[in-house]
Amino acid sequence: MTKPVTLIDTRELDVDARAVNSMESRALYKKREQIYPKLVKGTFRNLKWVAMIGLLAIYYVTPWIRWDRGAGQPDQAVLIDFEGRRFYFFFIELWPQEVYYITGLLILASFGIFLSSALFGRVWCGYACPQTVWTDLYIHVERWVEGDRNERIRLDKAPQSLSKASKKVTKHALWIAIAAATGGAWVFYFADAPTLFREIFTGTASAATYLFIGLLTFTTYALAGTMREQVCTYMCPWPRIQAAMIDKDALSVTYRVDRGEPRGPHKKGETWEGRGDCIDCRQCVAACPQGIDIRDGDQLECINCALCIDACDEIMEKVGRPKGLIAYDSYANQNRRQQGKAVAYRLIRPRTILYGALMAIVGAAMIYALVTRQTLDLNVIRDRSPPYVRMADGSVRNDYELKLINMAPAPRRLSIQVAGLEDARLSAPQLNAEGLILVSAAADRVTTVRVHVLAPGRTTGGSHDLTFTIRDLDTGDVATSASAFLAGGAR
Amino acid sequence: MADKRERDHISGTETTGHEWDGVKELDTPLPRWWLYIFYATIVISIVYWVLMPAWPLANGFTRGMLNWSDRANVAADVQFLRDARAPLFRRLADASVSDIAADPDLQQFARAAGASVFGDNCRTCHGAGGAGAPGFPVLADDVWIWGGTMADIEQTLRVGIRASHPETRMSAMPAFGRDGLLSAREIGDVTEYVVSISSARQRLEPNMAAAARGAVVYAAQCGICHGPSGAGDRTQGAPSLNDDIWLYGGSREEIRTQIELGRGGVMPSWEARLDAGTLRALAYYVHDLGGGEPDAPPPTPEASPTSPTAATSPTR
């Protein structure tokens, strides 16, 4: 067997990096230790660049996408119109009573995060969570202004000076600018973006607009700038929940104890026989935005961003050892390695099949509901007082309020009919000579019509089932609603 | 001392020293910023005491520097609404039924304002939706004692019934039994006759011999107000006796009791309490409940044989 040889002297790499959650210095209250994540290069860093740029682009650009819906309709592709009680998403327009689509989306999101956790552990935390994305952006700004890890540590230790102050002011000014842009983009989802943009800068936007911009500016600045890993460690419930989502086959960022230990500094030219591959250079700790040591094992604080993998791979390459001392791995594989068995990756297993199937079912149900969505609906509200009215000629009258829901962008001519009770007739100011009630329902509106139903006095007492039907005279669309007719009791 | 406490060997955190069935509790240190937030809330509360009404005093309370008053805010909101609605009320005051029906905005406003005023002032007696109660007429049906056009309804609202208004609608039925105007037997006969000319005759099956005797008494005592055929007379507020709607109950005993006692209710005059626009809204609401009659002058009973109610209830 050839004797493995290192290419560099690892003592040069030695840094003073210590995990913030190490066992030392515990007290009743825990002071936050500043973390100075070091820039790394590699596959996962590149993945995070793509995720960060892509997600930020979606967030900032979406409100500006236009979508023509015709005259009098908003031309914003994605718009949550609270005032008009509508939700617009490209070709979809939803009314408040169709909130079950949102329920469907939330169910999909839940199963999505269950599935991603079962497959790859906390990928949401590591790549897609807004806290991660904005923190990543803020760290890059910090690095751009103040330099990388060592320069930042030096700067913070240095006595106050003009150049230190100017760097700090520049950094915080940039942070606040990004925070304001974040809060500013948020409000565009709730109003016409170009109009609101003008209003914001001319000072004519509503107080609520400025309040929400201010609120999100503050939270972005505080959470991504000053709180960072504290949010994940102390505020977020997800790290606590994820234990239930992850099983022994789920992949997560893992230090390979079997390969790395016993760890220790390694001199150029020394043998690798009888020792682990970990040279204890602490690059993984220096790169970690959460400030932890992955070699301590899976931890609550770890967001699985995989930057320690990139950091370690860089070193392994330099010292001439195989990459993957820190890598995505599962508990099952760690056990297999201990027992000397071959590793196996089981991405397809009952749990992931179930999550995938549930997502497919919910997704299919939502698409079906969307494709077969009706734009005409009817709600009937029977007057409860008086429950019935006896008329001078002995007949009995019930009164109803009809909500004609026209979700189409054009007005409709509707006829109202009632069925289910013999000899019952409709009565309303709109009644025409043929005994039909004809009403026009405005576009994209709920039209309320009050109608009376009269039944002859011989109708047996008690409750009768009644069905109201509205029919579009032009398109033939039909909506029905069941109600009741109370004929009173015996006198 | 801290060193004496047990440390969990995995997390390195001290335990609280408690143990439940082998489960121990970690004494995880709180982040310091959490403590600072607690201090910040204390500071904020002191700032709040200075700015806002906070502490009760022997006679009153500390008002705070911002002069905040929920009472004043509500008053301002109410005034704002009054001002916003004033133009619509002014338009209502000059609008007829057809004017209101032709203007959807005005109609919606009249309905909403009328419903609200009805709920505040009328519902106690007439019931929600004008459902009525014994002695308090149903307003949702098509039976009107003093008339069912919008003008009639508004006039009734304005002057009231047996109220203190100088023009109030006034009618009084004698207490034929209590005041000894008719004997018990005559009252019994009239009761049978009244049942026989009403739509209640199918269900109450009057004694026709008694009814024939009662007809004579009716012609002498009742016909002058209720009309020779019992059709009623709205100009005097005499209800129709031809239908099966009874203000004081429709059983034989209840009809008889009403002849004995001649009861009549009181409705206040609303002219002094509600302005013209509000009265119009209220009249429109009541008219719109389902039994309102068209604005045209009511046709005489003989002239409207095709009216759906003509068979049993000629217009009164």
Image (tube, coloured by chain):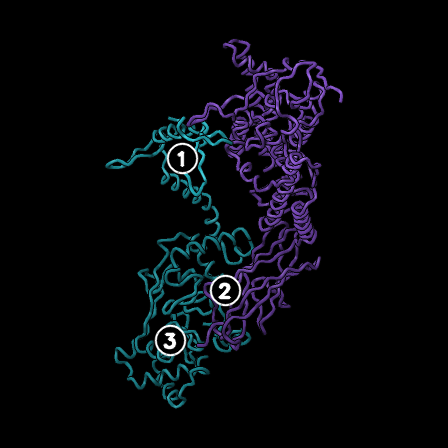
Chain colours: A purple, B cyan
In the picture, the quarter occupied by the N terminus of chain A is top right
- What is the residue that sits farthest to the left in this orientation? B58
Cα distance, mark 1 to mark 2?
Answer: 76 Å
- Residues at discs 3 and 2 both on one chain: yes
Residue type for callout 3 = Cys
Q: Going from the N terminus, do you reach mark 3 or mark 2 first?
A: 3
Q: What number is the disc on residue B290? A: 2
* Quadrant in the rendering for residue B249: bottom left
Residue type for callout 2 = Gly
Residue A140 visible, this angle: no
Residue drawn 49% across the image and 31% down it? B9
Residue A184 vs residue A207, the one in the foreground: A184
Q: What residue sits right under mark 3 in the picture? A: B225
Q: What residue sits right under mark 1 in the picture? A: B17
* Quadrant in the rendering for residue A314: top right
Residue drawn 46% across the image and 46% down it? B85
Q: Which chain contains the residue that carries disc 3? A: B
Q: Which chain contains the residue that carries disc 1? A: B
